């Protein structure tokens, strides 16, 4: 059974909120080319910034530690 691609991605806004951060958080990391982001996990499609579930899950333990990921 093939995976639904929508199960593998989320918007950067919803991922930021799920991390307990400002809704523009992942956008800021992406815009500043932060090394904390998993390589090739964030992409702009039209006007929407998307992050893979793998990229999001990579950030979860770092956010739980309370680290300021934006300084990455």
Image (spheres, rainbow, N blue to C red):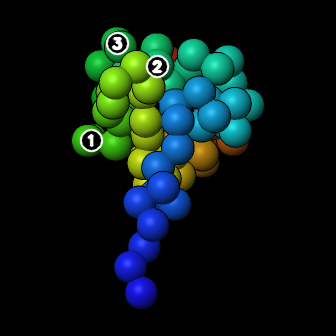
Q: Quadrant of the N terminus?
A: bottom left
- Residue corresponding to mark 3: 32
Q: Residues within 10 Å of mark 2 (few under 14, many from 20)?
A: many
> Secondary structure under badge 3?
loop
Q: Which residue is mark 1?
A: 39
Quadrant for residue 68, please give it: top right
The answer to whether 2 is drawn above or below residue 60 in the figure is: below
Q: Earlier in the sequence, mark 1 or mark 2?
A: 2
Task: Determine which residue is flagged by label 2.
Answer: 27
Residue 20 screen position, x and y as percent = 73, 31
Q: How many marks?
A: 3
Q: Quadrant of the C terminus?
A: top left
Q: Are marks 2 and 3 in contact (CB under 8 Å)?
A: no
Does residue 29 show up?
A: no
Residue 63: image location, x then y, percent: 63, 36
* Residue furthest bottom in the image: 1
Which quadrant would residue 4 be assigned to in this image? Answer: bottom left
Residue 43 at x, y = what percent? 32, 33
Residue at the location (63% across, 34% down)?
14
Closer to the chain start, of discs 3 and 1, is 3
User: Which residue is at the front of the view, 47 or 17?
Assistant: 47
Q: CA distance from mark 3 to mark 1?
A: 14 Å
Task: Confirm or deny contact between disc 3 and disc 1 (CB under 8 A).
Answer: no
> Residue, x 42% and y 73% (percent of image)?
3
Residue at (34% x, 24% y) in the render: 46
Query: Which of the two discs, 2 and 3, labels the residue nearer the N terminus?
Result: 2
Q: Which disc number belongs to residue 6? A: none
Residue 33 relative to residue 57: left or right: left
Figure check: 56 above or below 15: below
Residue drawn 60% across the image and 46% down it: 60
As measured in the structure, the alpha-carbon distance from the residue carrying label 1 to the one carrying label 2 is 15 Å
Q: Is residue 51 visible?
A: yes
């Amino acid at each position: 059974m093939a995976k639904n691609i929508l199960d593998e991605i989320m918007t950067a806004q919803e991922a930021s909120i799920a991390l307990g951060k400002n809704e523009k958080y992942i956008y800021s990391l992406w815009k500043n080319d932060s090394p904390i982001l998993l390589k090739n996990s964030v992409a702009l499609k039209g006007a929407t910034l998307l992050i893979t579930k793998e990229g999001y899950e990579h950030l979860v333990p770092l956010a739980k530690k309370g680290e300021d990921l934006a300084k990455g």
